[in-house]
Image: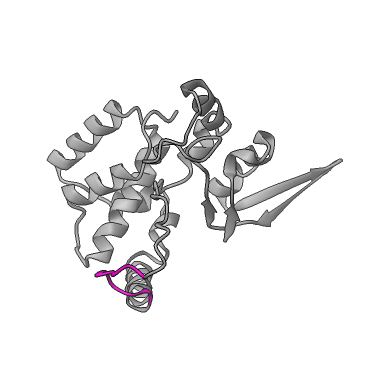
Amino acid sequence: MLFLDELPEFERRVLEVLREPLESGEIVVARARDRVRFPARFQLVAAMNPCPCGYLGDPTGRCRCSSEMVQRYRNKLSGPLLDRIDLHLTVAREATALSPTHNDGPDSATLARQVALTRERQQQRQGCANAFLDLPGLRRHCGLSTADEQWLETACERLTLSLRAAHRLLKVARTLADLEEVENIRREHLAEALQYRPAGQE
């Protein structure tokens, strides 16, 4: 796992180098006449602030960043790089209350077991995790009904998602179905997967 905090603060040329290993799981080192391939399959987790000061959308109104500043900050990340990140989540600022908040959701141990069972299900079905499905595997294991396929095509066109983003979206939807132990991808899985992708990637 590779965790990059304050993602836009890294040099753009450094981040762009990640694109190929994220796609192929390999990195090529070229020196003089030699080219050597090394395995480089990793899970990328990255974090960033919503704006340069970090307070955009804060209910206190502390953010003083202009829209131009926010756009310039976000433009440090290229569309092709963001295209290769499957889940984009906005996390609210943590409350400062000292008393612990009540959580009705499952605990970490329960979630870990669910994830382990889901990965095992994928291994038994196709020999790899959904994230590593190639195009033939995608067609075989991520099939949609005609109506859902048309719905997804319309959604991708409306959000100007690339073909790569659409393929990754299907893998996420397949995983959501697996977590629910559902054999076929449903419309609600596609809709949830769409929520994790920002629009307008090229």
51, above or below 183, in the image? above
What residue do we see at 18% from left, 34% from top?
150
Q: Quadrant of the C terminus?
A: top left
Q: Measured along the vertical axis of the image, is residue 99 above or below residue 139? A: below
37 over 30 or under it: above or below: below
Determine the residue positioned at 27% across, 63% down: 178
> Which one is nearer the viewer's eye here, 14 or 25?
14
Q: Which quadrant of the structure image shows residue 105?
A: bottom left
Q: Quadrant of the N terminus?
A: bottom right
Q: Tell me the residue at 54%/37% (across/down).
A: 53
Name the side, left or right, on which 187 lies relative to 167: left
| Residue 157 painted magenta | no
Q: Position of residue 177 (x, y in %)?
A: 24, 59
**From which residue to which does the magenta span run?**
100-108
Position of residue 33 measured from the top left corner of the image (x, y, whole percent): 85, 41
Q: Position of residue 2 (x, y in %)?
A: 59, 57
Does 36 sit left or right of 92 as displayed? right
- Front residue of 149/34: it is 149
